Image: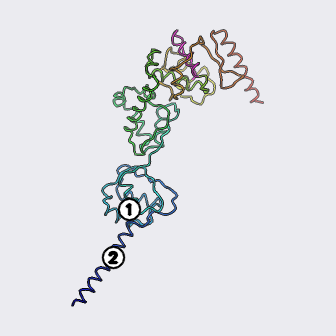
Amino acid sequence: MVKKIIWGLLFIGMIGGVFAYYTYTKIMSPNVPKTLENHLVYIPTNSTFSDVVKILHTNNQLIDTVSFREVSELMNYKRNVKAGRYKITPSWSNRSMIRHLRAGNQNPVNLVLTHGWLLEDVAAKAAQFIEPDSTDLIQLFHTEAYIQEAGYTIETLMSLFIPNTYELYWNTTAKAFFERMVKEHNRFWDANDRRSKAEKLGMTTNEVYTLASIVEREISKNSEKKRVAGLYLNRIKIGMKLDADPTAKFATRDFKATRILYKHTRFESPYNTYLHKGLPPGPISMASIQSIDAVLDSEEHNYYYMCVDPDKPGYHVFAESLTEHNKNARRYHRYLDNIEKKTKK
């Protein structure tokens, strides 16, 4: 009888040992392949546990989905799915993978904002880095009641966006993105006495940004931006029209135009500074930090006119009088005509 009990206990112990070993193997053995083609997994908002398994399986980031499901049940992950962008390490065990996903240890993205013309460009660029698509973002940008709470109109909203690189989580919502941009915008203007410099110019930050957006699209050389900003400020002071080519491009949406023609300058729009004095209703583009600071630290001079320098393409010659400017303009137009003749040959 005693032997039977002993053998029974040994049998039970063996079964328990086998079960314990099996459980340990499921939990601790590698279940992520040694070689991964894709080290990142994107778990969309509102994903279920089954969605996660399907994503990992489709990405070839799991060897065995059955053991993953079983260990997820043991580790209470099935009811704790967190959306986000996660970096997966080769040869991870189920335990390591689940702990990582369950904790929400996301791998952030570096969202890069560059110099788009329109709010649609901002939305399209941001949507490349975060979960909301461009439609979600542009819809928010055009929700007047929402953006007005932050002090903007649809016309001035572009001044919110400072071209830079921002670290965010992939599953950042459209509203969270907007709120982050508001914080970054305020941080930018609070630095380097920018607000006080704008006040000395008698301008709001939106107005500075609007002028900077014209400088941005007018000038490709950073070395000339302060001079050009000073030229435009001189025109504003005496009530002279800005006559800025980029505003005519923006008004007509002819962004690829290489020469501004009569049809551009005569196009009726509050943004067309060939027709209307002062600044447009809002920015015509995103403005770089260099262009914004060029306006705030603009060069003081007596220039009111500028023309492309045919001897140094990309740069400009400046003039104080219209007579001097017309001479520069005729020289530049002869240069363009010669190029056209050579092209036709």
Using the image, tell me which numbered label, if any, was put on residue 264. none
Percent x, y of residue 286:
50, 29
Crowding near the residue tagged with mark 1, few <14, some 14–19, many ≥20 C-alpha atoms within 10 Å: many
Q: Nearer the viewer, residue 343 or 57?
A: 57
The span picked out in magenta is 225-245
The residues bearing labels 1 and 2 have C-alpha atoms spaced at a distance of: 20 Å
Q: Quadrant of the N terminus?
A: bottom left
User: Looking at the image, which residue is at 29% across and 83% down?
Assistant: 10
- The secondary structure type at the circle numbered 2 is helix
Which is nearer the N-term, disc 1 or disc 2? 2
Depth check: 259 or 309 in front? 309
**Residue that mark 2 sits on:** 17
The three-letter amino acid code for the residue at tag 1 is Arg
Residue 104 screen position, x and y as percent: 37, 51
Query: Which residue lies under the disc numbered 1?
Result: 95
Count of number-bearing discs? 2
SS at badge 1: helix
Q: Position of residue 298 (x, y in %)?
A: 54, 18
Q: Is residue 307 left or right of residue 44?
A: right
Q: Nearer the viewer, mark 1 or mark 2?
A: 2
Q: Is residue 169 above or below residue 7?
A: above
Q: Residue 66 at what x, y percent from top left? A: 38, 67
Q: Main secondary structure of the magenta part?
A: helix
